[in-house]
Amino acid sequence: MASRWQVVIGLGLAWFGVLEAAAAAPANWTVSSPNEKIKVVIRLADLGKQRDYPSGRRLYYRVELNGQTVVDDSPLGLTLTDVDLSRNLAVVTALPPKSIEERYAALHGKRRERLHQARQLTLVLRGEKGRALEVDFRASNDGVAFRYRLPERMPLATAMVAAEATGFALPLDGRMWAHPADHVTVYAPAYETYYENEIPIGTPSPITNGWSYPVLFRTANARAWGLITEAALGTNYCGTRLQSQAPQGVYRLRWPAPDEGHNTGSPFPVSTLPWEMPWRVIILGDSLANIVESTLVEDLCPPSALKNTDWVKPGRVAWSWWSDPPSPQDAAKQKQFVDFAAEMGWEYVLVDANWTLMDNGSLGDVLRHAKSKEVGILLWYNSGGPHNIVTEKPRDGFTYREVRRFELEWLKKSGVKGIKVDFFQSDKQNVIQLYHQILQDAADYQILVNFHGCTLPRGWSRTYPHLLSMEAVRGAENYIFTGDFPQRAPVQNTITPFTRNVVGPMDYTPVALTEHNHKHLTTYAHELALAALFESAWVHFADKPEAYRALPAEPKQWLKDLPVAWDDTRLVAGYPGQFIVLARRKGSVWHLAGVNGQNQPREVRLEFGSWLNLAQAELLVMSDGADARTFNVQRLNWQRGQTPVVKMLPYGGLVGTLQQKP
């Protein structure tokens, strides 16, 4: 007869065997979007024989759209400096999916009234040394997102993430639009490389620093489109990117380069515990319209931190630097741009770099003149600091909190409305913290903000609505500096509305009409269209007053009337790398903007969807005329169901308005 201890030991061994068998069995969870079109499938399994993944029990996710796999089984997990939370994971519990419905109003961007609907599943896991890891998976009607959390409450403890296992297994027979992460230089990284146009998935980056967000991709049958990026990047993490190589189509995350930001800061993120990390985002849809019209990046961010937003005023900006780089040092020239802004009804003038060296009058003279004309003044600043060695003045005013707040207080007393802060050159955590610190302090003094030479928007404009724009694009300044820009700009202008500008405001500085160092290939109508095609709550018009005064009456009036904060945005037609036409609504008026990126004429049929709630309207279209510097102006009586055709020249464009007939 077995002893009592033999029975106990036997039962224990049997129970251990049950646990061991359960641990070996694959486990699956799913969460679907409210409209049931998008599904995330999560697996805890050993997929070591698939895509050359490491062996062992690991966490993977798969994304489906309308039953089609868009992102195949992709790895998840973190490696901390003291423990690996990407392997040997066990699920403690899977919290039941919860529904999310959030409505909010945006002060600027592609749409005013926002509705974020989603379902969220949270997995609670244990890894090595009993350490806890939680992963939130969210499926919304326009995409999926996931984030990691280290939930243990250890306020005096810090953790460092040495690596992420996070990957995106894209369809090997698909195509992608992506731009390489910049070489590290005195002025970079700044997200200013050219997008590669419709390349095979798996193509290595031509620059070994990796691929920058956002990355657009499609399946081979073009029935599914996706855009990879990240959102809600706080002070406790760095900005990430994708690795240069993608074995078997699996793109994995990588950190900033060690020498970014003039070698300041660590590439590895550090935080106290608990630790909630940024969202990894895949915007999804069965058409390009789903990508262009999405607000998912901002939807995932914390609500506005501002109690009072009456002072947040988007607007049009007259800007002298592009046409005359030394002009910020000349008070008389700045007054001329103030006069021009008043003439056009534009809200602001930007006084750019080196205004501290101003001659022929003072900044005070410019400010007083602008006040008399009811035009707001914006001032340029160098963000450095030890993280850059760019010499343009003023610099060293924003690194230290006491100095920064002293400067912001002076700006407030002087009547300055906003700042353009430039030259960040890093995605490391120390510089990401600086962005947030500038935004938080600027809010205290009601100073508007525009970042240049900067990182990519990650939804911060929702939390800080006084952040009106960010550069992070190869913009019109390259007509001055870059010999191949005129040849590449037309194609790039048809890619960025499907990529960079999807994720946040973009300060391209459009409507550059004058030949400036390098001859343009684009037409006047093309350049004019960029003012509405590219969304930015500050639109800095690049050219000199004489160039705009010389325009025909209708295009010039279109510039005078152009809104910069929109109530709605819709894709009318287009394909990245070829052409695009957008419709943006302000009040009851729809504003049209389109460009042709190809060196051949194009006819565009204006087909408006059910979103256009008009039975009949007056359609004004200004497209290319007989040559690149003229316009063809048409006024049409449009009725529902009509699909007028507009002709564009090679590298041409169109603008227009559609409004209810009186």
Image (cartoon, grey):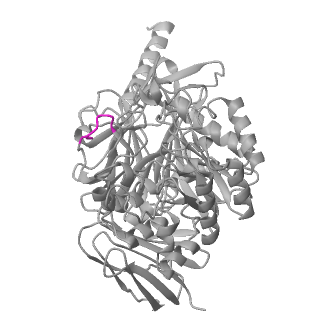
Give how far across and how far down residue 86 sits, in percent: 41, 28
Q: Nearer the viewer, residue 394 or 315?
A: 394
- Which residue is farthest front? 360
Q: Nearer the viewer, residue 563 or 277?
A: 563
Determine whether 493 is above or below 240 in the image: below
Determine whether 41 is above or below 555 in the image: above
The reply to whether residue 66 is in sight is no
Give how far across and how far down residue 2 sits, in percent: 44, 8
**Residue drawn at (54%, 40%), measured in percent from left and top?**
233
**Residue drawn at (38%, 52%), measured in percent from left and top?**
480
**Quarter in which the N terminus is drawn:** top left
The reply to whether residue 35 is in sight is yes
Most common SS among magenta residues:
loop
Magenta-highlighted residues:
204-210
Q: Nearer the viewer, residue 520 or 558?
A: 520
Give how far across and how far down residue 40 sits, in percent: 42, 49
Q: Does the magenta run of residues contain 244?
A: no
**Residue drawn at (69%, 31%), measured in percent from left and top?**
403
Give how far across and how far down residue 510 sits, in percent: 46, 61
**Quarter in which the C terminus is drawn:** bottom right
Quarter of the figure with residue 394: top right
Q: In this image, 638 relative to 302: left or right?
A: left
